[in-house]
Structures are given as C-alpha cells and as structure tokens.
Amino acid sequence: MAISHFLRVAMLFCMVSGSGAWGPLSHYLFAWQAYNNSDWYHEASVKQGCDMPDAFLFSNFGEFPLCSIPAGWLHNPVTAGYFVKFAQTQNAATSTFSPLAFALAYGSHTISDIVGFFPSAGYLGASVQSWVTTFPFMTAIDALASSQVQPPASPWATADSSAFVVAAGKFIRGTISDFPAYATGDVDNCTMPWQVTQQRLTEIAALELKTGFYQSAMVLFDQFNATTFDQALASFRASNGCAIKAVQYWTASILDSDVTPEAAFNQTVTFVEQLFERGACTASESY
C-alpha cells in the first residue's frame, strides 16, 4: 500500500501538531468514559494506550532528542486502527496487559484530538502561539478531568506496551511498505522521557485541583470568550461529550472485520463533521 493512503491523515497531523493539547489525564478520562463498561476493559492497558501517541508527537518538537520514530506515523488514527486489527490477532489479555484495550485506548487519543482540534470550533483552538502558554491550559483541563476519575497507579508505559508497538509495526509493514521500522529501544526512547513528563503534569494538575486555580485558568484560556467558570465548563462538557461520541463511533467501525483502518478513519471524520454542523460539539448558549 502506498503512502498516499495516509495523505488525509498527514494533513490532520499537520493541523494537530500546531495546536494545543489534551493532557494525559484528559485522555484517560475520555478513554474511561468511552470504554469502562466494556467486557474487555483493562485499566492499566488503557492508561498506557490513551496518552502514548503524545510521546511520539512531542518528539516532533525536539522535546526528546533520542526519540527517532516519525511522529506523523505514530500519532495517527489510521496507525491506531492497524494496532486494533493486530491486537485482534493476539492471544487474550493477561493479568498485566491487554493488547486490545491498549490499542483501542491508543485510538481514543487520536480520535478525541480530531474533536479538540477541529478547525474553527474545536475546544482547543486552531493554533498555538507558544507551547509555554499552552501547557497551563492543558494542566487546567487535566485538573478538571482528575476530579472525575483517577487513573490507576500503574505506569504510563511498560515493556509490554513497547513490545506491542514494535510487533504491531511489523504487522503494518506487511501492508504498508513505507511504515517505519523501529525496535523496542526506539519506542522506549520516546515513551520513557514522556512518562516523566506525564507524572509531572499529573502532579501540577493535582495542585491546581486542590487550590482551585484550574477554574480561573479555564476561563482565561477559553477560546469562546467565557467570563465565568460555568461558561468555560459548558464549553468543555460539550467538547467532552462530542469526543466520546466520536471515539465510540470509531471503535464500532474499527472492530468490524470488514472495515479497514483507512475507512474507519474517514467515516469517523465525516461523523465528527456532522456533529459540529449540528452544533453538538459546542456549548449551546453564546457568551
């Protein structure tokens, strides 16, 4: 399969890479909301999958010099779809790792990003002037997310998840010759530094929740010009609900054996576009 199949995804990646970000706790919240009632739910694997794409994304900005895996391939909803297809060929989950839970959570990250970064009306906005000022917004949203659910104390990345990403990459190269080759050490060079960042962001979010600072920050950064926390909260809740609808739609598509990862992505983008057209992803009241 030629790289042309990834052109639409590449365009999306370019949009996302210039935008703000959901933080690790927000991504865990979305995955938990979308999946926690599923028979296959495995919280440690969901935690590992739900924010791992950002380990590769932030390497794109030189955050982790040793991370050499191209972010455009790994922070990618089509790749996530192939992860799910590969997971379905694997043995059942063990007590420590579930390939399917990891892969679906990985996909939930990329799909919720489509909603958050949707042009003009996405909650996170269309562009960012400085990552220095973006991270306070991320941690403020994470503080709110952590008031709703706390991830388990397990690691954000393990040897199991790294091994899965390597094996899944080999699986993808059987179909897409351009997909990059990498080893476990290459994955670790991206995920382990990011895990330190994830832990620090979690600590900052906890402090913001304790002090209540996150409420003022969410008003300050709200792109819809909120003047009260209730207004800012309404904007977040609308986007949150939209993200869950999108994740669950993609999940149903990608679990269908007759639907390819490319088709699942395209169908989901169309679904999200329809949600925004109906006003289902933004607060109904104007400020």
Image (tube, helix red, strand yellow):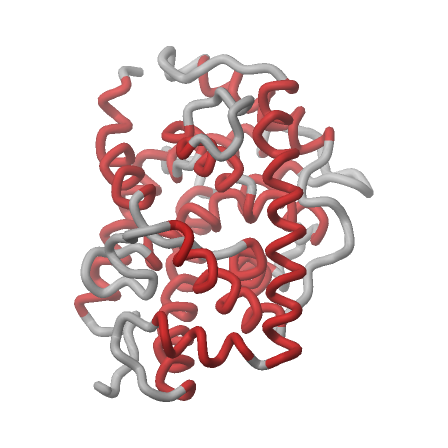
In the picture provided, is 130 more to the left or to the right than 199?
A: left
Q: Residue at x 36, y 75 (%)?
A: 220
Q: Is residue 89 left or right of residue 132?
A: right
Q: Is residue 197 left or right of residue 21?
A: right
Whole-percent x, y for residue 203 in the image: 67, 60
Q: Is residue 81 visible?
A: no
Examine the rendered structure and indicate whether residue 229 appears above or below residue 92. below
Which residue is situated farthest in the right direction here? 95
Residue 91 percent across, percent down from the top left: 70, 30
Residue 241's place in the image compared with 17, above or below, is below
Quadrant of the rendered structure where residue 60 is?
top left
**Which residue is drawn at the image coordinates 26% and 83% (left, top)?**
284
Residue 105, how many percent across, how many down? 55, 47
Q: Compared to 82, does 139 lie above or below?
A: below
In the depicted view, which residue is nearer to us: 268 or 188? 188
The residue at 27%/38% (across/down) is 14
Q: Residue at x 39, y 55 (%)?
A: 249
Image quadrant where one finds the C terminus? bottom left
Q: Is residue 140 left or right of residue 95?
A: left
Q: How many marks?
A: 0
Image quarter hosting the N terminus:
top left
Measuring from the top left, give residue 116's x and y in whole percent. Answer: 35, 59
For residue 38, say whether it is visible.
Answer: yes
